Image (cartoon, rainbow, N blue to C red):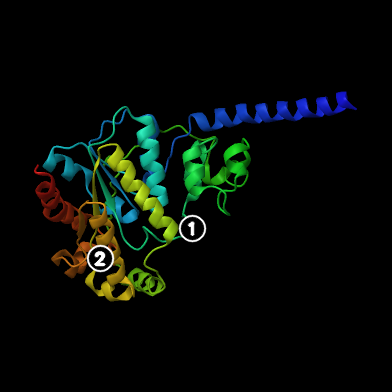
Amino acid sequence: MKKFIKRIFLFWIGIYFILLLVDWRVSRNYVWPQRYFCSWNHLYYDDMDDELLVFGSSRAQVHFSSKIITDSLGLKTYNFGLPGASINYSYIQLREILKHRKTPPRYVTLEVCFHTLMPRPLPYHYQMMPKMLFNVNMFRYHGNNDVYPTGYFFVPMLRYFNYWKDLDLFNKETYYTCDGNGYIGEGSTYNSKRNSELANLSKTYIPYDEKQYGVLKKFIKTCKENNISLLLVWTPEYYKYLDNLKERAELEKCFEGIAKDNSIPFVNFVHSEICNDSLNFENAMHLNANGSEKFTSEFYVPTFRNLYGL
């Protein structure tokens, strides 16, 4: 009986190590082909020497022009904004960056809005999967839930079971990078239909969630521990959208309080003049390419220069 149990045990150990080998081979050279997620390629495959990093949701990705920042401030910049990202997601990327690069960046700008501290499902969540196995950082901040069960982090190949098509794991020939260093300008003009959809959704948003708030405090603490100068920025929104978020005033005060308590700057651009012209926007929440270039050069860069004496 003992020999039988031992054989069964060794059989499953063997299966586990075979799956582990297959998992390593499948995940090892995975590159992200989608233009919106090319920052993952930069994180894992480039020799990162960026001095200024931008984090946040899609609003960060399409609002901060890395090239304009680099040319204006003389700081090599990369935009790590990602669609649908909450503070959990930004914190995972920050910790992965600190783990993979030799020295920390000098500056971090974190785009904040109602998404930042809101508990919400992560769109395109499969994008983290190739680097998830045994990744304590990802498990701590996105594991043990309906989206990422615990087994995804410890059982080889399990996480890929329903996502072969989404990840396209066996058809990787191109190392996808972004010409804009993570920044992706939206070329379209104002979309009133999309604006209406977003406005209706926004009426149910809440100011913040305590767990997300705790992660933001860890984000701030990690920056301080690594001598990174952190700036919180609420980027522009079309002025007709401003009244649709019921808790906007409370949420703005929340970020003001967080910044004050931690002695870090918070800059709010939602009431600036750039918000008054629909020609600057793709929809109420996202600037188009012309608007984002104007915002970066005429609002963000001067503010950054004044804050840090550049």
Q: Quadrant of residue 32?
A: top left
Instruction: Please say if 233 is above or below 223.
Output: below
Instruction: Indicate which disc residue 276 carries.
Output: none
Query: Dot 2, crowdedness within 10 Å: few (<14), some or many (≥20)?
Result: many
Mark 1 and mark 2: Cα distance apart in space = 23 Å
Q: Amino acid at mark 2?
A: Glu
Q: Amino acid at mark 1?
A: Pro
Mark in front: 1 vs 2: 1
Is any atom of residue 165 visible in this view?
yes
Write down the residue under mark 1.
Answer: 121
Residue 285 horizontal side relative to residue 148, left or right: left
Estimate the x, y position of residue 232 in percent, counting from the top left: 25, 53
Q: Position of residue 254 (x, y in %)?
A: 30, 64
Foreground residue among 259 and 175: 259
Element on which disc 2 rests: loop
Q: Is residue 38 visible?
A: no
The disc, 1 or 2, on the residue closer to the chain's N-terminal end is: 1
| Picture layout, residue 67 above or below residue 245 | above
As drawn, which residue projects farthest toward the front?
A: 261
Q: Quadrant of residue 150?
A: top right
Residue occupying the point 41% across, 43% down: 92
Left/right placement of residue 290 relative to residue 215 reads: left
x, y percent for residue 55 = 31, 48
**Label at residue 237:** 2
Compared across the picture, whether 16 is left or right of 208 comes to right
Which quarter shows the N terminus?
top right
Q: Quadrant of the C terminus?
A: top left
Q: Looking at the image, do the residues carrying marks 1 and 2 touch, with CB atoms under 8 Å apart? A: no
User: For the point 18% across and 68% down, which residue is it?
Assistant: 271
